[in-house]
Image (cartoon, rainbow, N blue to C red):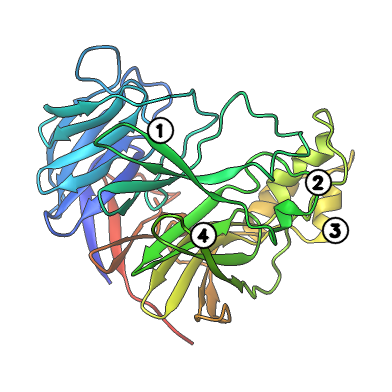
Amino acid sequence: MDSIQIHYLGNPIVHDIDPLSKTVLFMENNRYSVGEEIFVADFNGNILASFIKDGDTRDTYGHIMAPLVIDGKNSFMAYAFNGFMCYDFSGNLISRIKLVDFHNPNYRRIAMGRGLLKLGEKYLYMDLGSRDFEYGSKDFFDNYYAMSLLDPKTGRTESIIPLPETSIFRKGNFFFRYAWEPTFDVEDNQLFVVFGLEPTIYVFENQSPFSLISKIPIKLSNYHYFKGAKKYNRDDIRFYGHKRSSGKILNIKKIKDYFLLAYFPGYDHGDVEESFSDNISPGFWERMRKKYPIRIAILDSHGKVVNDFVPDGLWATSMLVRNGELWMLGKPDGEIERDYFQLFKVGLKIE
């Protein structure tokens, strides 16, 4: 297992890795900072440049809506409120294309392994939602498109991939917000999508009209997920509480003949009931954190599990494939503050 050790004292959010240019792009994870500082580092662990590109000047992006993506040997792109912004590794603006029909998104997802996916000259991303959507409507899931196809040359966004008719989300029930948040990957002519908590890999064509080809049931043991509610009540604490306890697929990657899934297994029935109890036992939430760590499952092409484990010292959700290589971010040591963080190139272990 090869590794990169970046000399940095802080709490980084890694955005992208490029093995060809041997570049790492990351930010400081500090919600209280005035500016979002961007860092460019090499594979020897040296920080080559840093700069701030939020704010309201001509060359700033405003607010980013997805992880920054390295799109050239010496450049990267930000999908942001101010448009598709391309910068060189010194922070100089190369180009800006304004977004067409922009709406204020409902949420963002900024993390390594959960970003934009290149499809030809465009980028695939999840639908970010709108603050105007009525999630309690019976028609919501029938009319909802889970993905977006972004064109950085025109600034246009095309909604694609409706929730399949066989999906659990099309059965007339209601779900807490983001229960259907997709994770996805592409290989050859196929696009693989898992819709949030639903344990199914949907296989689509990876070009317009993105037709559904097949679906692969995910055969995880001890996976507990919310099946939906018959009624919607925005004031029902129990309904929204399932967001904390329900299992969910958080990342999918396809490598050779195998799928890699990062997933939260979800609470069993007894723990779900206690989580809603008026008399939760002392230390309950800390015990749940330890009892239900995020796991990685390796599946064959039929969805059968060939290995399932808690990754030692690695963030499971950070799985990123670049140039055919699997990379993951190392977890910090909870006992020792270090002046560096690590990225690992990881191999598969099949049992």
Q: Residues within 10 Å of mark 2 (few under 14, many from 20)?
A: many
Q: For marks 4 and 3, give the CA distance.
A: 31 Å
Give whichever of discs 4 and 2 has the lower sequence position. Answer: 4
Q: For marks 3 and 2, give the CA distance.
A: 9 Å
Give whichever of discs 3 and 2 has the lower sequence position. Answer: 3
Give whichever of discs 4 and 1 has the lower sequence position. Answer: 1
Circle 1: element type: loop
Residue 266: x percent and y percent? 69, 58
205 or 4, nearer to the observer: 205
Circle 4: element type: strand
Q: Residue at x 14, y 40 (%)?
A: 75
Q: For marks 4 and 2, give the CA distance.
A: 30 Å
Which residue is under mark 1?
65
Residue 193: image tag: 4
Q: For marks 3 and 1, give the CA distance.
A: 38 Å
The amino acid beneath tag 1 is Met
The amino acid beneath tag 2 is Ser
Circle 2: element type: helix
Q: For marks 4 and 1, give the CA distance.
A: 20 Å
| Rendered image quadrant of residue 223 | bottom right
Residue 275: image tag: 2
Residue 270: image tag: 3
The amino acid beneath tag 4 is Val
The amino acid beneath tag 3 is Gly
